Image: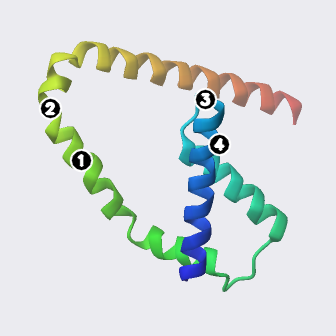
Amino acid sequence: MINGLMWLLVCQVVGEVAVRLTDAPVPGPIVGMVLLFALLQWRDPDEGAGVLRASDAMLRHLQLFFVPAGVGIVTYLAVLRADALPIVGAMAVSWLAGLLVVGWLVTLMTRRT
């Protein structure tokens, strides 16, 4: 399992370094996840592989990873209240844009089948 955790961390660090070196507008962990996905597609690990065991163990305790985010929201509650209208507006616009794009894609894909 330690070997699996090492691979997860190495992919995240490589993604972070790649983003910082290239000044890409993408978070480093996202690049690391894409790298990990490519490695897993290339190597096709066994059922008991360390990466799979480590990721299963982390997924079992996923709710604990949301605690720091919740504490951060409570810490910046005054800032969130001050900018509540732009935040809610941005959330509503992004929700509507996502809804329209998904609806358009569904109609496009159902026509093809």
Q: CA distance from mark 3 to mark 1?
A: 29 Å
Residue pointed to by mark 1: 70
Where 87 sits versus 10, above or below? above
Q: Are marks 4 and 3 in contact (CB under 8 Å)?
A: no
Q: Which residue is mark 3?
A: 23
Disc 1 marks a residue whose amino acid type is Gly
Residue at the spot of label 4:
18
Residue at 54% across, 73% down: 5
What's the distance in space between the residues labelled 3 and 2, CA to CA? 31 Å
Q: Residues within 10 Å of mark 2 (few under 14, many from 20)?
A: few
Of the two numbered discs 2 and 1 on the same chain, state the one appearing first in sequence. Answer: 1
| Inter-mark Cα distance, 4 to 3 | 8 Å
Q: Amino acid at mark 2?
A: Leu
Q: Which one is closest to the eye, mark 2 or mark 4?
A: 4
Question: What label sits on residue 77 in the rendered view?
Answer: 2
Residue at image coords 62%, 69%: 7
